[in-house]
Image (cartoon, rainbow, N blue to C red):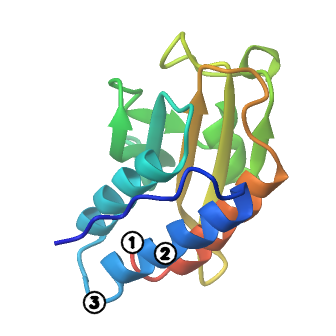
Amino acid sequence: MFDFKPDPSIDVAERYRQLVDAADALTSDEPDAVANMANVAALIWEFVDDLNWAGFYRVGESKSGAEELVLGPFVGRPACIRIPIGRGVCGAAAEKAQTQLVEDVHAFPGHIACDAASRSEVVVPVVREGKVVAVIDLDSPSPARFGKDDAAGLERLAELLADRI
């Protein structure tokens, strides 16, 4: 049985170090990508406070054959199922293969409001062999909730997961 709970008194960088260690423990021997994404989404929910959504969008194929982001495992309210590459915060992260740290989602050009309660967002691409295969998406109801330590911690998590999802 696993009981991954962070110490509430630790700083953000240490919290993400522990999150990555927990994700490594849960995913190291599991070959199923969906199972790994599901467990990691649950871990993020436990380790990162002030969230209203945490999970994954996977790169998939649209009906027309174009690549798009497709909803993967998550914790939170129901979400948009498909997001075009290049659209919204998630689509920008996938298109640019760069972390998107957004203090005010309503000021982000082309923001997709899946949950009207979301005010800030951080999205980190998961890159395998030079190609984005998914994004890790965290939303918060608080403006400017995420900072550089959050982005750096999630980037380490994405590196760990690149060959596991």
On residue 29, the disc is 3
From the top left corner, tell me how far across and down residue 20 is, in percent. 53, 72
Q: Nearer the viewer, mark 1 or mark 3?
A: 3
Residue most toward the bottom?
29
N-terminal of the pair, mark 2 or mark 3, is 3
Element on which disc 1 rests: loop
Whether 78 is drawn above or below 130: the answer is above
Instruction: Check if mark 2's residue and mark 3's residue have beta carbons within 8 Å.
Output: no
Compared across the picture, whether 71 is left or right of 133 comes to: left
Give the residue at x 52% y 58%. Answer: 7
Element on which disc 2 rests: helix
Q: Which residue is label 2 attached to?
A: 161
Compared across the picture, whether 111 is left or right of 3 comes to: right
Instruction: Give the Cα separation between the discs numbered 2 and 3.
Output: 12 Å
From the top left corner, tell me how far across and down residue 67 is, in percent. 50, 51
Instruction: Give the Cα separation between the discs numbered 1 and 2.
Output: 6 Å
Q: Nearer the viewer, residue 126 or 64?
A: 126
Q: Give the class, few, some or many, for how many residues have Cα within 10 Å of label 1's Cα (few <14, many ≥20).
A: many
Of the residues shown, which amino acid type is indicated by label 2? Leu
On residue 165, the disc is 1
Give the residue at x 31% y 68%. Answer: 36
Element on which disc 3 rests: loop
Whether 72 is drawn above or below 40: the answer is above
Instruction: Check if mark 1's residue and mark 2's residue have beta carbons within 8 Å.
Output: yes
